[in-house]
Amino acid sequence: MPMLRLLPAALALAAACPASAAVAPVTTDDVADAAEQAVEALPVEPAEESVAPAAAGREASQVGWLEIEGSLRQGPAPFSFLDPADLPPSLSDVLAQIERVETSDDHAGLVVHLKGPELSLSQAGALRRGLERLKTAGKPVVVFAAAYDTTGYYLASVADRLLLQRNGSLELQGIAVEEMYLAGMLEKVGVEADLMQVGRFKGAEETFTRTGPSEAWSENIEGLLDGLYGGLLGGIAAGRGMDRAEAEAAMADAWLLDDAGLVERGLIDAAVERGLTEETSSLFGEDFAWDTQLGRAGGSAMPTSPFALFAQLMNPPARGMKRDGVAVLHLNGPIGAGESGSDDGLFSSASIGQDSVVEQAAELAADERVKAVVLRLDSPGGSAHASEMMFQALEDLAAVKPVLVSIGSMAASGGYYLAVAGDTIYAEPTAIVGSIGVVGGKMSLGGLYEKLGVGIHRRSRGPNTGYLDSTQPFTDAQRERVRASMVKIYDLFKERVAGGRGERLGELAEVDAGRLFTGEQALEKGMIDAVGGLPQAIAAAASAAGLGAGYEVEHLPEPLPFPEAISAMFGGAQVSAVAAKKATLPAAAAAARRLLGPAAWTAAAGWLDAAMQLRTEPVLLLHPAAIVIR
């Protein structure tokens, strides 16, 4: 079921709890399982021999064949010894494949086969714009699937020909919200959430301190939902040549309609059999060659000899740019101290570490080949102190060369704190931007210890050790001092936003206090400079640096070579809280991932990772919840 969910950290914990009696809803994994059963019914893929280019000297066009399956990787590969051909493609990889068809004189058009993709709305929007540019270049776009969910259909609706397999599935249910409020549960188990927030609309503490939403939070999230749904519905309506009312009415009836009804209502152009011969022949003729690689490596280049393999693993990869260009620094995940982490699927989840970013900013400032930098941000925030330290480092970088920002799915709270260090900010139309506010406090576990029969005897020295006492809530004096510290950080946050945005920002009072905005709404408020994706930000950065054609683009952080990867995994490197839970509770984590779906689990895990910093840092710049569209 397509859905937007607000998933607090506790949701990940509840999903992993074997005692939970909740009935699991139908998840995206269930849909994927059904899709796998239907794989044999999918259209016949281009035969291998048909992929070969035309013989030399014979003029013949090619048609691109692009498959999108599962989730798209964010940023560079985590390890240098992994062959890119063996990894899931990144969003940048797929956009480059679309651009290849757009700019090539040899390609007549593109067929996109959606095989159960797990895309965020922002990723779908970025791909959609790539297909729009392809259409503008006069090259037809065909999209085919056996089943469409809301996000996949939003992407597909831009196509010249939108095809559904005969008797396939079209489920367009819009956007829904499920919010969890845990105050009642925490009271039953003896946990007291002693949390505070600065910013009336922040909502970050409500999950744990209330049994339902406040009026301010409802106003905040309703405005965000209006923006997200408006963009979704408007895109579908424009793509299918309908007005919004027609599109919404058709969406409401989609799951009841047969193939003929879907065509009649304009939701699809045709219901087709396994083969696409008739469709492709009518658009591209019969004399063309399929291009299934579209510039992407076609297979692993790992050597077969064990000695050669060992040598390749141990040799560090060549680093740095060979000519002038733009560096793209990917900053994904919650913000904290220490080193950044990449989502390697094994030991680490994505995180933004203060030490890594400060060091990377200094290296980029000193690298003469790097003429401009793009920060690719996707973060719910986290540590207030780390956000400020990284802001200073990025501000120093921006003083010596252009620094532009590209916001993917989210730059909220601490994430937006980093964004305003850049000269120019681009954001996806459906990105979540803002949440300028502060949350702080702790969880008091004394009642839980008592229920479990656990005796705690605390010893301490020093005037401030009581702030992180896990057995007791704050005293009135402690609470007053924590709130004063939060106000101080909040004032600095607003100062950074006002200074970074300058006269481009409207009234600060209209965007602060924890308010949330889509990228489109943020543009109207002057919080960003333009709606667009990473390619647009890179092109603008190159222009700002005065780079001509042929400039190089380097994606950072660089993949870890084998020795450093082994050291990071087993040499005592910092492992995130969520990654540790995955390692120690693999069955529970797998169950939670299956219950929530891959996209929801990733978002919930990142939020949990950031929220757990309250154990050591009582004040955070954290977006109130993980938001996922399914």
Image (cartoon, rainbow, N blue to C red):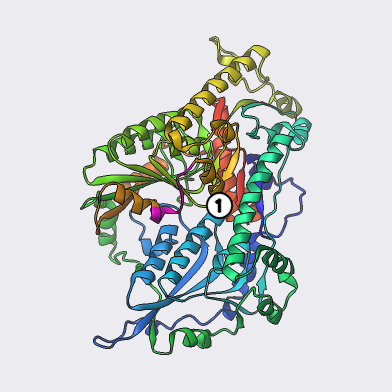
Q: Is residue 244 above or below residue 39?
A: above
Give whichever of 565, 423 is nearer the camera.
Answer: 423
Rate crowding at label 1 as few (under 14), some (14 to 19) or many (20 or more) other CA atoms within 10 Å.
many
Q: From the viewer's perspective, tell me whether residue 184 is left or right of residue 409.
A: right
Say which quadrant the N terminus sits in.
Answer: bottom right
Give whichever of 234, 444 is nearer the camera.
Answer: 234
Look at the image and give the residue range highlighted in magenta.
528-536
Mark 1: which secondary structure?
loop
> Can residue 543 be seen from the camera position used here?
yes
Residue sitting at 38 percent across and 33 percent down? Answer: 355
Give whichever of 476, 139 is nearer the camera.
Answer: 139
Residue sitting at 59 percent across and 13 percent down? Answer: 459
Say which quadrant the C terminus sits in.
Answer: bottom right
Residue sitting at 33 percent across and 73 percent down? Answer: 104
Q: Is residue 420 above or below residue 328?
A: above
Q: From the viewer's perspective, tell me whether residue 559 is left or right of residue 476.
A: left
Residue 390 drawn at (x, y percent): 40, 33
Residue 583 drawn at (x, y percent): 53, 45
| Residue bearing mark 1 | 430
